[in-house]
Amino acid sequence: VPSSPSNPTHKKQLSSNSKASQPTHARAHHAPTKTKLKMGLFDGIMKAFENDEYGPPPDAVKASARHILVTNTVDAKIVKKKLMEGDGSSSSFATLAREYSTCPSGAEGGSLGSFQPGTMVPEFDKVIFSPDTIIGSVIGPVKTKFGYHLIVVDKRTGGGDWY
């Protein structure tokens, strides 16, 4: 009897021989793989949608600073002299801020926290964000509409030449 597609014997033979007739890589198709396929031009197009070349967005320009606000230059000079006579530590600055500062931040040792340019009055920002201002040094007195400030910049992040 010749085999034909309508012959059930033929179907049985096809199904029993189907695995043997398939190459081994076709049988392993259902097994999970971790191979990355290279597709040439498609790989180049996919890279256009990735951000691997670009780092995270730059940090916003910010600064952390402390200050002591007094009403006149005489008081500013007295407080600055006491700062220079002290050990220069942040605790002596905080103590003098609590004692002399007319700003509510004096209760926090003069700490203003972290802020961006434009948050403070322009005269204050100019000193804080100037690349010439040395981190940790006492600057001032700086005159603003509030009075006279003795300022210490504790930290600056982001950006470069701000002013």
Image (cartoon, rainbow, N blue to C red):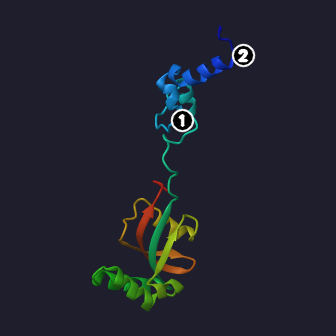
Q: Secondary structure at mark 2?
A: loop
Q: Quadrant of the N terminus?
A: top right
- Is the C-beta separation of discs 1 and 2 under 8 Å? no
Of the pair 77 and 20, the residue shown nearer to us: 20
Question: How many numbered dots are placed on residues in this image?
Answer: 2
Q: Position of residue 116 (x, y in %)?
A: 54, 65
Q: Which residue is mark 2?
A: 6
- Label 2: few (<14), some or many (≥20) within 10 Å? few
Alpha-carbon span between mark 1 and mark 2: 30 Å
- Choose between 36 and 74: the one closer to the eye: 36
Q: Quadrant of residue 80?
A: bottom left
In the rendered image, the residue lying farthest to the front is 1
**Figure quadrant of residue 6:** top right
Q: Is residue 38 above or below residue 60?
A: above
Sequence-first disc among 1 and 2 = 2
Circle 1 Cα neighbour tier, 10 Å, few/some/many (<14 / 14–19 / ≥20): few
Q: State the residue at coordinates (39%, 87%).
A: 96
With respect to residue 41, does 138 lie above or below? below
**Mark toward the viewer: 1 or 2:** 2
**In the structure shown, which secondary structural element does the residue marked by tag 1 occupy?**
helix
Given residues 97 and 8, the one toward you in this image is: 8
Location of residue 107 in the rendering, given as x and y in whole percent from the top left corner = 48, 88
Q: Amino acid at mark 2?
A: Ser
Q: Determine which of the numbered discs, if any, sits on residue 84 in the image.
A: none
- What residue is rendered at 50% in x and 22% in y? 20
Residue drawn 44% across and 76% down?
Answer: 66
The single residue placed furthest to the bottom in the displayed view is 99
Left or right of 114: which side holds 15? Answer: right
Q: Position of residue 92 (x, y in %)?
A: 34, 85
Q: Which residue is mark 1?
A: 30
